[in-house]
Image: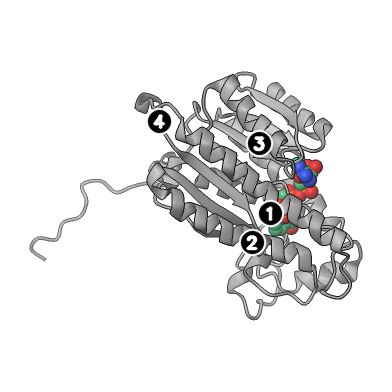
């Protein structure tokens, strides 16, 4: 057909894999809840990209262990563990200040720390203290992280030769429960994750022209201590498994890969999004018969 020409080169799988994004190794990250689960895998994945970070957790020992792993595997990468309760503004501010003092900038903030209280229940049976604690950590903690991220990111020096610029990327961990209903009640947790989605969307709009992007990660149910401690009987596990299109829970490393994409400049036109990494759960009515031939990927922490 006249005018229709094939491209002069056919692209190969190697070309495509080379094009996959990496976070510039001069970029600096703050990760909360870095001692376990999604935060741990994300800390290791970022370090594997050469990205230095401040690792915040209420459990200092766990954050130190993550940092230790990074130092052993990636000796050129700096990882600074710090004790931080994200519900305390001064402690969150101290984490942001630590990154700026130590590295001169802050490009990525992953507000990931969160709790699912064992006594969280339905509207009638949830104690007010459980409600308050959940909102303090899961909602207020994310707000504080965003607030201090904005201040630091506005001041980021620009050096395009290293892929560094003003602004940054903030990723807030919400959950699929902020998008979908479940008759396994956790009223405080569900409410907190809906709030994270709404907060993230508004922040994305307000700060879009400052080069600061905000996205909400919405993990599906995962094989991490947070959920597995909660699903402590075969009945509880199976009640969920039957609804999962892939027939398995997600792995924290699968979330970390989504976070890496949202943190990198490869997602430069994505902001204000509910980024679902849920194995198809939110698209599902009835799951297929059988089991998947594919094993879940291995996390970095277990390698
Ligand atoms: N695991 C799941 O199935 C799942 C699903 C959807 C969303 N999420 C969300 O993902 C995030 C991480 O969950 P995870 O599964 O990795 O959990 P996890 O329990 O494995 O890790 C959470 C980490 O946060 C830390 N933490 C708790 N409270 C804190 C506080 N006040 N200040 C600072 N650090 C604190 C803990 O010490 C822990 O290291 C949470 O926001 C959670 O709600 C998890």
Q: Residue lying farthest right?
A: 233
The quarter of the rendered structure image containing the C terminus is: top right
Task: Give the residue pinned by disc 2.
Answer: 195
Residue 36 is at least partly visible in this image: no
Give whichever of 265, 75 is nearer the camera: 265
Q: What residue would you read off at disc 3?
A: 43
Mark 1–mark 2 distance (CA, rounded to whole Å): 7 Å
Pick whichever of labels 1 and 3 is earlier in the sequence.
3
Question: In terms of depth relative to the viewer, which is nearer, 23 or 110?
Answer: 110
Residue 163: assigned label:
4
Q: Position of residue 205 (x, y in %)?
A: 44, 55
- The residues bearing labels 1 and 3 have C-alpha atoms spaced at a distance of 22 Å
Q: Earlier in the sequence, mark 4 or mark 1?
A: 1
Whether the residues at callouts 1 and 2 have beta carbons within 8 Å, the answer is yes
Q: Position of residue 192 (x, y in %)?
A: 70, 61
In this view of the protein, can residue 90 be seen by the observer? yes
Please tell me which of labels 1 and 2 falls first in the chain. 1
Label 2 CB, ligand 1: below 8 Å? Answer: no
Q: Position of residue 135 (x, y in %)?
A: 74, 56
How many numbered dots are placed on residues in this image?
4
User: Where on the picture, by quarter, is residue 177?
Assistant: bottom right
């Amino acid at each position: 057909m006249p005018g229709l020409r094939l491209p002069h080169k056919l692209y190969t799988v190697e070309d495509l894999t080379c094009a996959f994004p990496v976070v510039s190794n001069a970029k600096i990250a703050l990760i909360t809840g870095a001692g376990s689960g999604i935060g741990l895998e994300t800390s290791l994945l970022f370090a594997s990209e050469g990205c230095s970070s401040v690792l915040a957790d209420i459990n200092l020992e766990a954050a130190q262990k993550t940092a230790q792993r990074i130092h052993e595997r990636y000796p050129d990468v700096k990882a600074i563990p710090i004790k931080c309760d994200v519900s305390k503004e001064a402690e969150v501010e101290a984490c942001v200040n630590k990154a700026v003092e130590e590295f001169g900038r802050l490009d990525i903030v992953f507000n990931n720390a969160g709790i699912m209280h064992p006594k969280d229940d339905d509207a009638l049976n949830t104690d007010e203290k459980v409600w308050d604690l959940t909102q303090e950590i899961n909602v207020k903690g994310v707000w504080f992280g965003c607030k201090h991220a904005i201040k630091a990111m506005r001041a980021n020096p620009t050096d395009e030769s290293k892929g560094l610029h003003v602004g940054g990327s903030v990723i807030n961990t919400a959950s699929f429960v902020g998008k979908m209903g479940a008759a396994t009640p956790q009223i405080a947790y569900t409410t907190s994750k809906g709030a994270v989605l709404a907060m993230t969307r508004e922040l994305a709009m307000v700060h879009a022209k400052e080069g600061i992007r905000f996205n909400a990660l919405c993990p599906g149910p995962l094989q991490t201590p947070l959920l597995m401690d909660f699903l402590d009987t075969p009945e509880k596990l199976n009640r969920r498994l039957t609804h999962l299109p892939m027939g398995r829970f997600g792995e924290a490393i699968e979330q970390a890969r989504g976070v890496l994409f949202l943190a990198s400049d490869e997602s430069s036109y994505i902001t204000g999004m509910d980024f679902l990494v849920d194995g198809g759960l939110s698209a599902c009515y009835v799951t297929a018969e059988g089991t998947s031939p594919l094993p879940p990927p291995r996390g970095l922490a277990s390698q």
